[in-house]
Amino acid sequence: MVEIRGVHKSFGSLHVLRGVDLSVRPGEVTVILGPSGSGKSTLLRTVNHLEKADRGSITVGGDFVGYRRKGDKLYELPEREVLRRRTRIGFVFQNFHLFPHLTVLENITEAPVAALGRPRARAAATAHELLDRVGLADKARAYPRQLSGGQQQRVAIARALALEPKLLLFDEPTSALDPELVGEVLDVIKDLADRGTTMIVVTHEIGFAREAADTVVFMDEGRIVEQGPPADVLDRPRHERTRAFLSKVL
């Protein structure tokens, strides 16, 4: 589903990604761990072309998100085509990014109507189904300010699912939540994992990684240091840097 090959990314003199290679198969959950500044979020943002990789290539479902190939060269696509391809990739941010002036229902239906041209009635019916799935069937007419942080994040997940994406990306989806609200969001993500949704999740929640991930990736200083099944990376890490990190968070 996702092929990342030799990806580099710099911001000025800061080399954030240093030749990252990663494959994610359909239906798999890949969890990315690592200290702050290791490049986790930047890598996630390059997958759907919110950040442009300086070198290397990324495909999702066999297609480049921001480019087309002609012969041996890649040419950047017009922004309109980038946006169209980006609809295949759901992105759930740390801070929800809900529209405060729209109701929950409107937040979920806006993208399917505007980006995919779906009839509003069909989009609304799908939104109600998704709200029921994330446990918020009674909040359709509420505004974001009337919801807890955990509820807002569950709405954000429903909004991402409304586009029926091939891939879901989560950038530390619980980091902005009070501790007692973390579980309700992780339960929704675990349910998605059980349904076979392909996901890449950047998180510090080791318990979630152990329970839901097919592959755990540990990053440091812009590189993948170690990757493998949760039992190997979390319980029997091979690299000293991984062991040092886990000793501080477990």
Image (spheres, grey):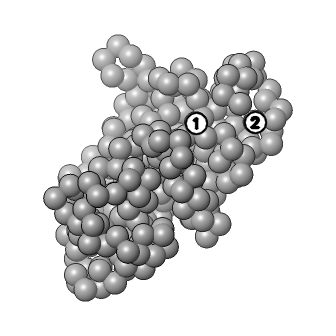
Q: Can residue 81 be seen in this view?
A: no
How many other residues sit within 10 Å of disc 1, few (<14), some (14-19) or many (≥20)?
Answer: some
Q: Residue 106 carries which label?
A: none
Residue 82 % position (x, y): 27, 54
Camera sees residue 227: yes
- Where does the image place residue 204, in percent across and percent down from the top left? 58, 36
Q: Percent from the top left, x then y, of residue 175?
A: 47, 39
Give the residue displayed 45% in from the left and 43% down from the top: 177
Above or below, 125 against 152 in this view is: below
Residue 204 numbered tag: 1
Q: In which quarter of the image is the N terminus?
A: bottom right
**Residue depicted at 23% across the width and 66% down the height:** 103
Tell me which numbered mark, 2 or 1, is placed earlier along the sequence: 1
Task: Indicate the quadrant containing the C terminus: top left, top right, bottom left or bottom right.
Answer: top right
Q: Which of 78 and 96 is in front in this view?
A: 96
Query: Where does residue 93 sit, x and y in percent of width and height?
Result: 39, 46
The residue that disc 2 covers is: 234
How many numbered marks, from 0 up?
Answer: 2
Residue 189, quarter of picture: bottom right
Q: Nearer the viewer, residue 138 or 106?
A: 138
Q: Do the residues labelled 2 and 1 touch (CB within 8 Å)?
A: no
Kindly state the secondary structure of the residue where label 2 is placed: helix
Q: Which of 218 and 129 is in front in this view?
A: 129
Q: What element carries label 1?
A: loop
Q: Residue at x 22, y 74 (%)?
A: 113
Identity, as a three-letter code, of the amino acid under mark 2: Leu
Q: Quadrant of residue 45 in the image?
A: top left
Q: Which amino acid does label 1 sit on?
A: His
Is 195 left or right of 53, judged from the image as shown? right
